Amino acid sequence: MKIETEVISNEIIKPSSPTPDHLRHYQLSFLDQISPPTYNPLLLFYPADGDVKINNIEKPNQLKQSLSEVLNLYYPLAGRIKDNLFVECNDEGIPFFQAEVKCRLPQVVENPDPSELNKLIPFALDDAEELPLGIQYNIFECGGIVIGLCISHKVGDASSLFTFIKYWAATARGEADHIPRPEYISATLFPPINISGFKPATGITKEDVVTKRFVFRSSSIELLKEKCSPASGSLENQRPPSRVEALSVFIWQRFTAATKVESKPERIYSMVHAVNLRSRMEPPLPEYSFGNYYRIAFTIPSIDTGEESYNLVSQIRDSIGKIDKEYVKKLQKGGEHLGFIKEQAARFLKGEVISLNFTSLCRFPLYEADFGWAKPIWVGSPSLTFKNLVVFMDTASGDGIEALVHLKEEDMAKFEEDEELLQYIVPTKC
């Protein structure tokens, strides 16, 4: 449904204590430098409690006060990004918008439109050059609340956003003493280099991209996992496909069927999975390591493998498995990887490579963000600024998966009508 919002206030929230002089220059890492200048958004939906004063005054004040305290530790977020090189941690603060939404929260949650959800976040997602963070506090007519957050990909990945939210919520509840503090060592592990000739904004687009949300129940996912499992009596020692592996294969197959990729043999078609590096380093990094700690694994499937789904699962595992400790050591030198991504960007711009990109937010503690009122009843994302992108998120029940699919308009028209896809997804409510 259409969403109408009106911003009723805009404040700048600054750290409650000034950032010490020796922390005022936060160096971006090589991985920060090559990350796209976009925002990672997240939307947290909370049920109505019916008290107008609490919703309009007390809750936002509680959020602002706790946010001011949290920014003492997450001080780069209150600064300003400079020249894709560093953050000037000058305590200028972050924008905190308060908006009224002209509908009831259940109307949005029951059948969310990703393109309309962009009205609940503070920034346009493709404008992340300077401000590291923004918050929008949305109040619905029924008293329901949505907290919309945007963190610049230049300073942190999705995992960094989730650890920030976890610490902020714990601070609001008065329980922050039990949460680890952020660790800022990314520029030491991945020193910045001169990235001349590479444009981090490659791939960002807003034109002719349609975003649809497809929900897979646990029963459907189990059926897809069975389709991807090795035949009885063969490869018995191989672990069964994960939920994300099974869905990646299924969506890839429906995407290739919809777009008829086999008719263009001169192009290379690839599956791309975002991979968290924290556990793949030596020694492994804790989850509260702040920054961009991710890279992407490329899988080039054989288009003519038909329904040999397990073969494709194996290819995905092999590709992701190559991002190991030795890979990370080479990545820390920077130069070789820069040459590789320059080559990939050039092939993308020429149309030589068509990729379907996958990123999974499953198993992250999205539904644990309790600011002292309640846990969210739904966690969602608005439309992002890339085409051929699939984002996986857990459903509120925790056993299903939502797939946020971004495709060109003509491709989406075929994809969403695919008969096999329709057999596995939850029907959309009209």
Image (tube, rainbow, N blue to C red):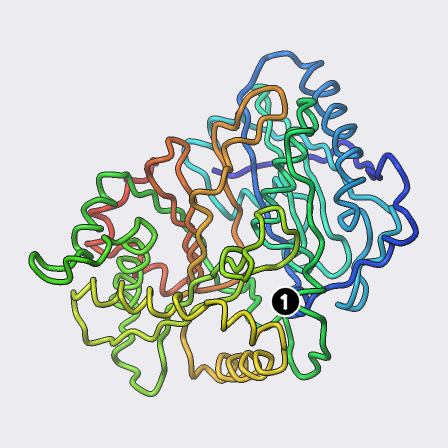
Position of residue 115 relative to residue 397, above or below, is below
Residue 232 screen position, x and y as percent: 7, 56
Q: Residues within 10 Å of mark 1 (few under 14, many from 20)?
A: many
**Residue at the extreme left of the image, as rendered:** 233
The residue that appears at 54% across and 69% down in the rendered structure is: 328
- Tell whether 251 sits left or right of 185: left
The residue that appears at 44% across and 52% down in the rendered structure is: 360
Residue 57 screen position, x and y as percent: 75, 20
Residue 8 screen position, x and y as percent: 75, 31
- Rendering quarter of residue 228: bottom left
Q: Amino acid at mark 1?
A: Leu
Position of residue 371 relative to residue 241, above or below, is above
The residue that appears at 64% across and 29% down in the rendered structure is: 178
Q: What residue did someone put label 1 on?
A: 31
**Residue at the extreme bottom of the image, as rendered:** 266
- Tell whether 29 sits left or right of 249: right
The residue that appears at 40% across and 47% down in the rendered structure is: 213
User: Secondary structure beneath disc 1?
Assistant: helix
Q: Nearer the viewer, residue 347 or 18?
A: 18
**Residue at the extreme front of the image, as rendered:** 283
Q: Nearer the viewer, residue 361 or 422?
A: 361
Position of residue 257 relative to residue 363, above or below, is below
